[in-house]
Image: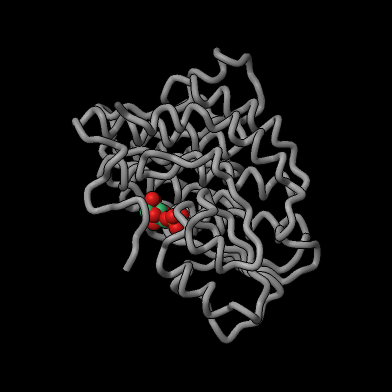
C-alpha cells in the first residue's frame, strides 16, 4: 500500500482546513521582523512563505535552514516549521532562542519537543502523514500561512482539485531529468518539487530561480530532459528551452500541460501550489515505474535526528 498517493490527493481538503487557522495566535503580525526556519521540505516552505510575506508588504522576512540561522541577528519572531517536531537542528535553535526571541512552531505533532520548547504552537495534526516523504503537511503549512496573508485558499484548493486529477505532463519513459524553475515565492516550490523527485524516486532533478537558470544550468537542457516552470516566468523562456530539444512544461503553455486546455476550457494557469501537487504525482510515478516504494526513500527517515 502506498500512503503518499492518498496523502497527495487529500491536499485540497487539508488546505481548506488549514485556512481555518489563519488567525491562530503566534502567526507573524504585520510589521514584525520575522525569520522562518526548517530543514529539507520544511525549509523550502519557509523560503516560499518568506518571499510571499515580503512581496505582500507584511514585513521583513528571512528564511534559513535551521542549521544556518545567523544566531547574532535579532528578529521579533522566529517561526519554525517541522512536521515531526523532533528534527535536531530545529530543536537546537528553539532551545538557543528560548527566553529571548518569540518563537512559534508549526507542527503535526503537539506531543513532540518542538511544541513544548516554542512559545506558541500551531498544530496541523489533520495533515500528518504515514509516508516519510512530506507532501500534505508541507503544503497545508503554506496554505495556512497564505491564508494569514489574506489569500483566498478556496480558489487555490479548487486548482488543487484539478491538479490531483490532471493527466501528468511528464512521463517516466520520456524523461531522464527534470529542472524545476520558479520566481519569487515559487522558487521554494520548485526546490520542493525537485526534492520530491530525488527523495521518492532517486531521480535526477534540479531547481533554480528562472532568471538565474539562464546563467549556466541551461547547459544541461537536452532532448529527453524537461524544464518545468512554476508561476510567472520570462515569456521567451519556453523558446530558449525548446531550442535545446528539452520539453518545456508550464500550466499556461501548450507543451507539457497539453491536456489542461482541453480539460478545463482555456482556464487561467494553475496556482503554483497546484503545480507542486502535479509534480508530487510525477515523483510518485517515477518511483513506482522503477519498482521503488515512494513512501520509504533510501537513506531517509521520518525525522532526521543527529
Ligand atoms: C524535515 C525532513 C523532511 C524530509 C523527511 C525527513 O522534517 O528532513 O524535509 O522530507 O521527511 O524530515 P521535519 O522537521 O519537518 O519533521
Q: Quadrant of residue 193?
A: top left
The chosen color scheme is one colour
Residue projecting furthest to the right: 30
Q: In what quadrant of the picture does the C terminus appear?
A: bottom left
Answer left or right for 18 relative to 288.
right
Q: At x 54% / y 32%, what residue is drawn?
A: 11
Residue projecting furthest to the front: 111
Answer left or right for 110 relative to 156.
left
Q: Nearer the viewer, residue 106 or 237?
A: 106
Q: At x 62% / y 58%, what residue is drawn?
A: 121
Point out residue 182 in the picture as x, y percentages from the top left corner: 53, 49
Point out residue 266 in the picture as x, y percentages from the top left corner: 63, 18
Q: At x 77% / y 49%, what residue is drawn?
A: 23
Point out residue 255 in the picture as x, y percentages from the top left corner: 46, 27
Q: How many marks?
A: 0
Q: At x 36% / y 38%, what residue is drawn?
A: 226
Answer left or right for 151 relative to 295.
right
Question: Can you say whether 41 is above or below 175 in the image?
Answer: below
Question: Can you say whether 65 is above or below 298 in the image?
Answer: below
* Ligand 1 placement by image quarter: bottom left
Point out residue 283 in the picture as x, y percentages from the top left corner: 35, 36
Q: Nearer the viewer, residue 243 or 209?
A: 209
Q: Quadrant of residue 161?
A: top right
Question: Can you say whether 263 is above or below 298 in the image?
Answer: above
Residue projecting furthest to the bottom: 72
Whether residue 214 can be seen here: no
Q: In what quadrant of the picture does the N terminus appear?
A: top left
Q: Nearer the viewer, residue 204 or 160?
A: 160
Whether residue 81 can be seen here: yes
Amino acid at each position: 500500500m502506498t500512503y503518499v498517493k492518498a496523502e497527495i490527493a487529500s491536499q485540497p481538503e487539508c488546505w481548506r482546513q488549514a485556512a481555518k487557522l489563519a488567525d491562530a495566535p503566534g502567526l507573524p503580525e504585520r510589521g514584525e521582523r520575522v525569520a522562518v526556519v526548517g530543514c529539507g521540505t520544511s525549509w523550502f516552505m519557509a523560503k516560499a512563505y518568506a518571499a510571499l510575506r515580503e512581496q505582500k508588504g507584511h514585513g521583513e522576512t528571512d528564511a534559513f535552514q535551521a542549521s544556518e540561522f545567523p544566531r547574532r541577528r535579532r528578529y521579533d519572531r522566529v517561526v519554525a516549521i517541522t512536521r515531526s517536531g523532533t528534527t535536531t537542528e530545529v530543536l537546537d535553535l528553539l532551545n538557543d532562542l528560548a527566553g529571548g526571541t518569540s518563537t512559534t512552531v508549526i507542527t503535526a505533532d503537539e506531543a513532540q519537543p518542538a511544541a513544548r520548547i516554542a512559545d506558541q504552537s500551531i498544530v496541523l495534526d489533520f495533515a500528518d502523514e504515514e509516508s516519510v516523504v512530506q507532501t500534505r503537511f508541507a503544503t497545508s503549512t503554506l496554505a495556512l500561512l497564505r491564508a494569514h496573508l489574506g489569500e483566498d485558499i478556496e480558489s487555490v484548493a479548487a486548482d488543487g482539485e484539478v491538479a490531483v486529477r490532471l493527466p501528468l505532463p511528464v512521463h517516466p519513459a520520456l524523461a531522464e531529468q527534470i529542472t524545476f524553475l520558479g520566481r519569487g515565492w515559487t522558487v521554494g516550490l520548485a526546490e520542493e518539487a525537485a526534492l520530491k523527485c530525488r527523495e521518492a524516486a532517486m531521480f535526477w532533478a534540479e531547481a533554480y530561480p528562472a532568471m538565474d537558470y539562464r546563467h549556466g544550468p541551461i547547459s544541461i537542457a537536452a532532448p529527453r530532459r524537461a524544464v518545468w516552470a512554476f508561476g510567472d516566468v520570462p515569456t521567451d523562456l519556453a523558446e530558449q528551452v525548446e531550442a535545446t530539444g528539452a520539453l518545456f512544461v508550464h500550466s499556461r503553455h501548450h507543451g507539457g500541460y497539453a491536456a489542461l486546455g482541453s480539460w478545463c476550457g482555456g482556464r487561467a494557469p494553475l496556482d503554483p501550489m497546484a503545480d507542486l501537487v502535479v509534480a508530487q504525482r510525477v515523483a510518485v510515478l517515477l518511483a513506482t515505474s522503477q519498482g521503488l516504494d515512494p513512501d520509504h526513500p533510501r537513506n531517509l527517515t521520518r525525522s532526521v535526528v543527529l
